[in-house]
Image: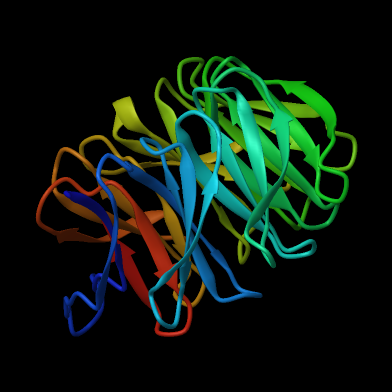
Amino acid sequence: MKFASVLLAIGCLLSSVNAQWLEATICLPDLSGPHGLCYNSQNNTVYCANAGGDNVTAIDAVTYEVVATVAAGDQARVLCYNPQDNKVYCANLGSANVTVIDGATNQAVATVNTGDSPQALCYDPQDNKVYSANLGGNVTVIDGTTNAVVATVDAGDQPCALCYNPQNNEIYCANRFSGDVTVIDGAADTVVATVPAGYGAVALSYNAQNNKIYCAVFYADTIIVIDGATNQVVAAVKAGDYPRALCYNPQNNKVYVPNQDQGTVTIIDCAGDTVCATVTIDGEPDAVCYNLLHNKVYCA
């Protein structure tokens, strides 16, 4: 039998040593189509959404063993974690719903209907809510305790990314085809602003140190910077060809931007919102994440 796989601790880029290594490979059944990952800090478990298998794999982060396979909906793609209730949420693009998984038992405990084609998830810890951005043009709000839908918020054309601003208790939603960012009040679940970004707004990241939101605009090769206090655009930073994702380094106050068609990562100094470095890597970079413990950035 052929296998798909998930690579854990795959290496380090953008560090002073520039080391790369492969620590473990977890084999999944063929055609699983691993697509999204999230971490359960309470149980030290990594979850992998499998778009081809319509399920979620739970992996022990110490032994790297598969401890459970949880049935989800059609095209399970995106995950997020609710630490307050120890739940994992899986957005199912093809079945227009979210599967809720109990982190203690790794059992599906609810299926929540959303708008068409849920594409992104984020968690609001202040109000214990989960937000699902749906490509159909809205955002579904789920109560973290009851798993009930408590609101549906209209967004722009093809909402595809979310991030949370804890300082203002606001949720930001990037809309790919309308080229803007919808700002949602986390307490009232109402739209408080619509911020112009540019055609192809595809990724968001929050900078807590300066209370700013960074939005990658894929077709403009630009990162738009939004002031979290005023929800106004305060800068536009030129990146490489087709910036695809973002992550924030709080220790160095920098944002990392993988440029899919250029094979580079643009590094932005958030103090002045200027490019301070460009790192060349192999392949077509598509995703980045930050390791707080070792101050390293990982790039897929």
Q: From this viewpoint, is residue 162 visible?
A: no
Of all residues shown, which one is farthest toward the front?
1
In the image, 248 versus 70, the foreground residue is 70
User: Taking 294 as reference, is 258 left or right?
Assistant: left
- For this view, does 66 lie left or right of residue 284? right
x and y percentages locating residue 35 in the rendered image: 38, 44
* Relative to 201, residue 298 above or below: below
| Towards the viewer: 62 or 276 | 62
Q: Position of residue 293 (x, y in %)?
A: 47, 84
> How many numbered callouts?
0
- Displayed quadrant of residue 296: bottom left
Up-down relation of residue 176 to residue 92 (above or below)? above
- Point 40% across, 84% down: residue: 294
In this picture, residue 204 sits left or right of residue 187: left
Colour convention of the picture: rainbow
Residue 280's spot in the image, x, y percent?
Answer: 12, 58
Q: Is residue 269 above or below residue 48?
A: below
Place of residue 141 in the rendered image (x, y in percent of width and height, measured from the top left): 77, 34
Image quadrant holding the C terminus, namely bottom left
| Residue in the foreground of this view, choosing between 239 and 162 | 162
Residue 203 appears left or right of 288 = right
The single residue placed furthest to the left in the displayed view is: 282
Query: Residue 81, located in which quarter of the rendered image?
Result: bottom right
Q: Residue at x 78, y 57 (%)?
A: 125
Query: Visible in this render: residue 105?
Result: yes
